[in-house]
Image (cartoon, rainbow, N blue to C red):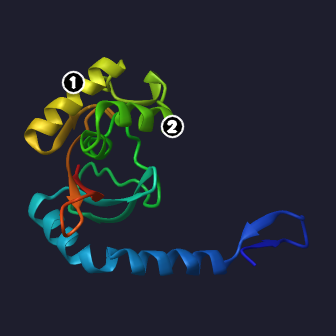
Amino acid sequence: GYVRQNSENSRYHLSTKLVAMGFQYLASSGADIVQPILDRLAQETGELVRLGVVDGERLTWIAKSQGARSGLRYDPDMGRDAPLYYTASGHAWLASMSDAMALAQVERQGITPPEGVGPNAPHSNVELLERLRIAREQGYACVEESSAIGTSAIAAVVRSPLGKHVVGVLSVA
């Protein structure tokens, strides 16, 4: 099974079968194919480069490469969903949708309380929609001190080979 119980304390733990299933998903997602590209971009920029994939109504970071060799490094865990309301990745993905769809998507995910984000995070849906409008015009999204003080990021969507739908987001932070 995917879960096993510890006989000493009766607590449940995830099994290695679940981990193996996760690795199978990553192999089929193309993350292994794109890793050299992420590595090169991280080396050239000296920044964290991440790939997020769209999975239904979620944008999940599945691959990364850290370009910073010293000093302050931003290096969050992979496998987390990208917060849509205040990240460059979230804004890039939301900008690929209509305003109504974007707001519905944010509502489904929820909004982090103001104390959990940077000082430049959007403070209203009106402000968010203005940022999405700018991202649509530019073809990419930028944030500065939106997630946390001292951080900035830029992100653009990755489209399917025929360009009909968004399959992921590439970000540099």
Q: In the image, 161: left or right of 115?
A: left
Q: Which residue is mark 2?
A: 108
Q: In the image, 5: left or right of 140?
A: right
Residue at coordinates 37% horizontally, 36% vertically from top-left?
101
Residue at coordinates 19% horizontally, 55% vertically from top-left?
47
Which mark is on residue 130? 1
Q: In the image, 157: left or right of 2?
A: left
Q: Amino acid at mark 1?
A: Glu
Say few, some or many: other residues with alpha carbon within 10 Å of mark 2 (under 14 / 14 to 19 / 20 or more). Answer: few
**Residue 152 visible within the image:** yes
Q: Amino acid at mark 2?
A: Arg
Which mark is on residue 21? none
Please state which of residues 153 and 105 is positioned toward the viewer in this rendering: 105
Q: Secondary structure at mark 1?
A: helix
59, above or below 27, in the image: above
13, above or below 20, in the image: above
Q: Secondary structure at mark 2?
A: helix
59, above or below 123, in the image: below
Please state which of residues 156 and 96 is positioned toward the viewer in this rendering: 96
Marked residue nearer the N-terminal end (2 or 1): 2
Residue at coordinates 41% horizontally, 42% vertically from top-left?
83
